[in-house]
Amino acid sequence: MRSLAVGAILAGLAAHTVGAQPLDARLPTCLACHGENGTSQLPDIPSLGAQPAFYVTVQLLMFRDKLRVTEPMNEMAKGLTDADLQKAADIISKLPPPQPVADNPDPARMDKARALSQQHRCNFCHQANYAGQENVPRLAGQREDYLLKALRGYKDNSRRGYDAQMSEVVYDLKDEDFVELAYFLARQK
Amino acid sequence: MTYPSLRQSLVLAGTIGALLGAAWPTAAQQPAPAQQAAPLPPGSPLIGRPDTADAKRLAPVPAPPLAAAADKLPVDKLKAPKGFKVEVYASGMPNARSLALGDKGTVFVGSRLQDKVYAIVDKGGKREVKIIASGLYRPNGVAFKNGTLYIMELSQLSKIDNIEDKLDNPPKPTVILDGLPKDEAHGWKYIAIGPDNKLYFEIGQPCNNCLPPEGYATMRRVNLDGTGMETIAQGIRNTVGFDWHPTSKELYFTDNSRDWMSEDLPNDELNRMTKVGQHFGSPFCYQGNLPDQEFGWGRKCEEFTPPIALMGPHTAALGMKFYTGNSFPAKYKNQILVARHGSWNKTNKLGGDVVLVNIKKDGSAGPIEPFLTGFLENNSYVGRPVDVMVMKDGSVLVSDDWNGAVWRVSAGGNARTAAR
């Protein structure tokens, strides 16, 4: 499903050179991948709902200036002005928070992850409700596969952060910790 | 503003150390934090974790990704001693960080969170900002020697020859040293070229507090063509500023100490390297006299080289330079100006200023006094100083990565009178 949808979008990007479009014309393409109501239905593609505007501004800047190198985001952010970045961030931050996974979570896994989160102070920067703040993203209700991908990326230095904070945080963490944390956070409201 | 003297801090830390050393509670003995409903089981890694509402608010303060507009710069909020003037040197450089000076007066500015290196050209008092390199990864380190600009990214060193003749059409930098570790934590680099014509940089400790793997937490130096890299010191957690004493030629450097031990300990450090091969303590001993809670067991602080001055807890002492100019009052000569970026791991932030560290004739440190203040207002940042640099006219430039600007502090005619 992902390759079909993203492939279609990529083909569309190539055809219309999104990098030449004004911001307003690009937004429907953003929402096609990331979900219209803040929740992404596509594997490995993050939900954007209720992400702090500061964080979104920074990520879009990183895509625009190729501090993070990952298509199609580099093309999607190409040529945006600083004012565009802030405007896009404002719009995205107002999307509804993503729908968390609604199953019967394994209480042992949830307890273990909760303890990990407290031990490594996730609930400090990301806040007690994991809604994030300023340059710290919302984790509550984020896609489990995306959370896992992000944590692994910080661990092997393939995911570039604005700052080095997450790299410092994951230094003491192992892959099995990431699995539990992703499980836990995807189920937070 | 008073700063703990080294002696006072040693007494204080020594007292605390004695108390802790005598009766350091093991995880099993330490009482659970009052706020927990149920006591934590013995051995729980959560015991001792800060659990107060204040502590939970502590998070790194993010640098604005866009430079402040020229008319929004807090020039009226910055204060220097009587007789000195503070003005904007240049602005519009998001995340302006380390500074370097070309032979023709060009000021080069690196960046830690963005991809560009800037050049500021002064045309008869009007400054123009040019981008002379882009697409780089954390180009925090900049240095200049004999016409060549050196740029240090996260894990590679490159250069542009004859840069000052090519500011409007600079070639891409040529990589002269790569293969360095790519760890992000404390991986951004400060570089400087020493009296021995070698380029110095650090491989930082890749964590807040851990046993650094081989080669990390070390100071390195390399020939200007990228060959002959050697390790000259260990136990340095994260240095983002260093300079050589004008007469003794010894290397002095700042070092940022660990977080999450306490709000008031350990201090950030000012160190002095008197020979090759010294170990400055991290992660076993911080600030010269504070054994680390985790790694200090079985070690003694006396094994390591202590700092010569304590720069305050969580002040983020970064760029530093010996004042070698001739336009400031005489008392500034050969003293060290240190930029303190300011705290995040502390409820009541400290730093956000540039201080003057007195250096005595024997090279040791004396009292510390404020020089440029006002970056911290009501516990929030209006700016954050990163690096300092002495210009040929004796004025001092201060970079500010919060505003994406460079400030200039100059001594007016009555500065020398006021200082007497």
Image: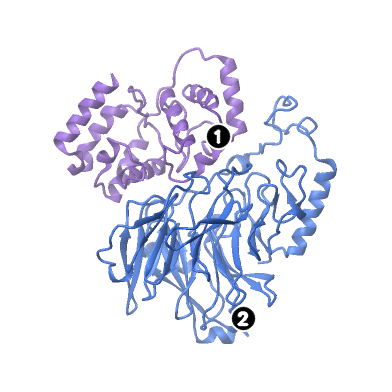
Chain colours: A purple, B blue
* Percent position of residue A117, x then y: 57, 30
Q: Is residue B14 visible?
A: yes
Residue that protrudes farthest toward the right in the picture: B22
Mark 1: amino acid: Cys
Task: Look at the picture and state if B224 lies above or below B263.
Answer: below
Is residue A57 rendered to the left or right of residue B271?
A: left
Tell me the SS state at disc 1. helix
The quarter of the picture where the C terminus of chain B appears is bottom right
Please identify the quarter of the rendering in which residue B245 is found: bottom right
Residue at 60% from the left image edge and 48% from the top image edge: B345
Crowding near pointer 2: few (<14 within 10 Å), some, many (20+)? few
Mark 2: amino acid: Lys
Tag shown at residue A122 = 1
The quarter of the picture where the N terminus of chain B appears is bottom right
Closest to the observer: B268 or A189?
B268
Residue at 44% from the left image edge and 22% from the top image edge: A100
Inter-mark Cα distance, 1 to 2: 48 Å
Residue at the spot of label 2? B331
* Percent position of residue B247, x then y: 60, 77
Tell me the SS state at disc 2. helix
Is residue A177 rendered to the left or right of residue A45?
A: right
Chain of the residue under the numbered disc 2 shown in the image? B
